[in-house]
Image: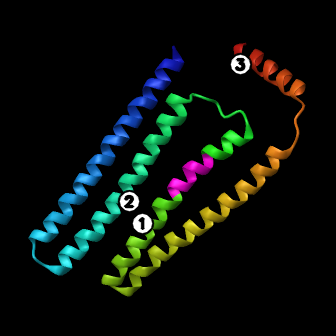
């Protein structure tokens, strides 16, 4: 019963996030349209940059919804193996890295149109993105090493059986 409730919650979250993603895209189109109607190049430039930022956010939100749907509803696995965990975490972090780097670029362009002192925030965001990429690379390297360690299947099965007994008690 709890499994069904959890799958229902994941499905509800995935559908809600997908709808939010669509709303962000619609809102970005409306923002750009309002900038065009204003007949002011500065307003249009600002509206377009805001629109790009919202579309990037929409893509990130949709990717999270897709991740929830694929990993928690369709596959419903517990990530017991190191390669499964590595692939799942890599996919998720890659989405975050792409969204954050695109947002950093949008902020750089916005800072270019305003005061130059505003450039510090996009630079900091791009620095954090760089650290995320380095961290993901380190994780990949460590995970691949962990995957190459041979585990005796008999010991592994005994550990799983013992863990199942503990969770039932």
Q: Do the residues labelled 2 and 1 touch (CB within 8 Å)?
A: yes
User: In the rendering, at what x and y percent does residue 154 appear?
Assistant: 89, 24
Secondary structure beneath dot 2 equals: helix
| Residue at left offset 51%, top offset 56% | 96
Quadrant housing the C terminus: top right
Read off the residue under disc 1.
103
| Residue at left offset 71%, top offset 18% | 167
Instruction: Please tell me whether residue 86 is drawn above or below residue 130 in the rendered image.
Output: above
User: In the rendering, at what x and y percent does residue 57 appear?
Assistant: 38, 56
Secondary structure beneath dot 3 equals: helix
Read off the residue under disc 3.
167
Read off the residue under disc 2.
56
Label whose residue precedes the other's in the sequence (3 or 1): 1
| Residue at left offset 62%, top offset 63% | 133
Residues in magenta?
Answer: 89-96
The number of numbered discs placed on residues in the rendered structure image is 3
Indicate the quadrant where residue 15 lies.
Answer: top left
Disc sitting over residue 29 in the figure: none
User: What secondary structure predominates along the stretch shown in magenta?
Assistant: helix
Instruction: Please tell me whether residue 94 is drawn above or below residue 15 in the rendered image.
Output: below
What separation in Å lies between label 3 and label 1 (alpha carbons)?
A: 43 Å
């Amino acid at each position: 019963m709890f499994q069904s409730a959890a799958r229902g919650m994941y499905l509800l979250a995935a559908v809600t996030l997908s709808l939010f993603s669509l709303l962000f895209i619609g809102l970005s189109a409306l923002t750009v349209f309002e900038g065009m109607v204003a007949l002011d190049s500065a307003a249009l430039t600002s509206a377009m940059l805001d629109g790009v930022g919202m579309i990037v956010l929409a893509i990130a939100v949709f990717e999270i919804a897709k991740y929830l749907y694929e990993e928690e509803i369709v596959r419903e696995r517990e990530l017991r193996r190191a390669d499964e965990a590595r692939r799942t975490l890599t996919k998720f972090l890659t989405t975050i890295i792409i969204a954050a780097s695109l947002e950093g670029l949008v902020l750089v362009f916005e800072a270019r149109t305003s005061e130059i002192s505003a450039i510090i925030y996009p630079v900091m965001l791009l620095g954090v993105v760089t650290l995320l990429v380095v961290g993901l690379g380190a994780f990949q390297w460590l995970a691949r090493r962990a995957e190459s360690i041979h585990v005796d299947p008999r010991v592994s099965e005994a550990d799983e059986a013992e863990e199942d007994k503990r969770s039932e008690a």
